[in-house]
Image (cartoon, coloured by chain):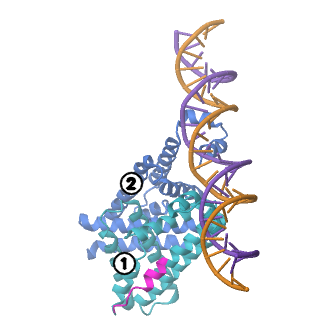
Chain colours: A blue, B cyan, C purple, D orange
DNA sequence: ATCAAATTAGCACGACCGTGCTAGTTTGAT
DNA sequence: ATCAAACTAGCACGGTCGTGCTAATTTGAT
């Protein structure tokens, strides 16, 4: 993702792009924020259905690369992670996205399993977060048109497992 | 990871390195194979303790970046994933590592939970694989000296959960 | 000792990169 | 109509990149 690539793909000259984003870091920063913005927009546009499990599942399915859009976003995210050691100014952005997804997982776990204390919620959220990112990574490594039913199934399994912790504590 | 970087870090000139690895792709390919080799060496060097759960847990802990060595290896792996779209000749290497880890997870699941049919083993292995990679990714995003107790705890939870499926099927 | 092979070292070329800089062009308020 | 501000476009510099190429050095067998 070089500035020349972005500029040519956007159909503008490099100098024009540099007027809006004077440096490459600002361009990547905007891309990251746009990625977060679009993801949250997808999330809030999901109408609640009354059933917590299906709602949470719908939200999680918007976080893994099942559609070309979310796939492109994840590729941006991976590039961000890969370039973070070289571009230290991008680390806060990456960490922000990381934490946002974490607190979302915490909210989902709290909605899913009532009566859990804070430590249990944190542990389950970490676990859910890891599973979501792991599934996303594996989906990204497979061809875009490969069967992805296992991913949604694994997500469904995990969500129902968390929901079952309501009573068992 | 440029050829000049590798050469200077190895203390040799670029031309010398290019005599062994004529092209950058071959250098990365060797790095990937070395990474796989070292990981499997770590794995087979783990003496069995008699308890399946602790053995599996020990193996899994060698797959996540808890030590500087495994951390560096995962960074190589991430760079491989990130560069795979640009260097198509590296895709088979990355897929090979991916599949090797998958079949390892399948063996671990089969050892952990007896009596599971093939489909159930495959599903649990996929899930374990995703969790391991997700935890590894999250550990890599945190500072190297951060607390990593949550990772081993999450792994322990998952392993015991799988082991409990022996009877419940 | 000789000589061929293997290895090491280094130069040079073209390509791409980020970015500072200036020159045109459009826009919009007065 | 005027003019300043915003925007677009492009050039040029220094840097890093991968890689082809040749020269020097070491190695090892005869």
**Which region of the structure is painted magenta?**
B38-49
Task: Indicate the position of residue D17 as horizontal and vertical percent values.
Answer: 61, 54
At horizontal 33% and vertical 61% (from top left) the residue drawn is A106
Q: Pick the quarter of the image with the C terminus of chain A.
A: bottom left
SS assignment at label 2:
helix
Helix, strand or loop at disc 1?
A: helix
Provide the residue designation for mark 1.
Answer: B158
Q: Nearer the viewer, residue A169 or A103?
A: A103
Gap in Å between the C-alphas at discs 1 and 2?
24 Å
Numbered disc 1: what chain? Answer: B
CA neighbours of label 2 inside 10 A, class few (<14), some (14 to 19), many (20+) = some
The correct choice, above or below, for A140 with respect to A3 in the image is below
Where residue C8 sits: x, y (%)? 60, 65
Which residue is depicted at the point 33% across and 74% down? B152
Give left or right: position of B159 versus B84: left
Residue marked by disc 2: A100
**Residue A115: mark:** none
Query: Is circle 1 on the same chain as circle 2?
Result: no
Q: Chain of mark 2?
A: A
Above or below residue A146? Residue A2 is: above
- Residue B77 on the magenta segment: no
């Amino acid at each position: 993702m070089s500035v020349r690539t972005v500029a040519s793909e956007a159909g503008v000259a490099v100098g024009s792009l540099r007027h809006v984003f004077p440096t490459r870091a600002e361009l990547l920063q905007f891309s990251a924020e746009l990625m977060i913005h679009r993801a949250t927009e997808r999330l809030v546009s999901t109408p609640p259905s009354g059933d917590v499990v299906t709602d949470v599942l719908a939200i999680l399915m918007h976080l893994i690369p099942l559609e070309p859009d979310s796939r492109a976003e994840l590729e941006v995210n991976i590039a961000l992670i890969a370039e973070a050691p070289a571009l230290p100014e991008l680390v806060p952005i990456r960490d922000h996205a990381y934490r946002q997804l974490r607190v979302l997982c915490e909210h989902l776990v709290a909605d899913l399993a009532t009566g859990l204390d804070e430590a249990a919620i944190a542990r389950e959220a970490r676990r859910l977060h890891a599973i979501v990112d792991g599934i996303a990574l594996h989906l990204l490594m497979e061809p875009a048109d490969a069967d992805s039913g296992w991913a949604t199934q694994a997500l469904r399994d995990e969500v129902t497992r968390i929901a079952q912790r309501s009573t068992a504590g």
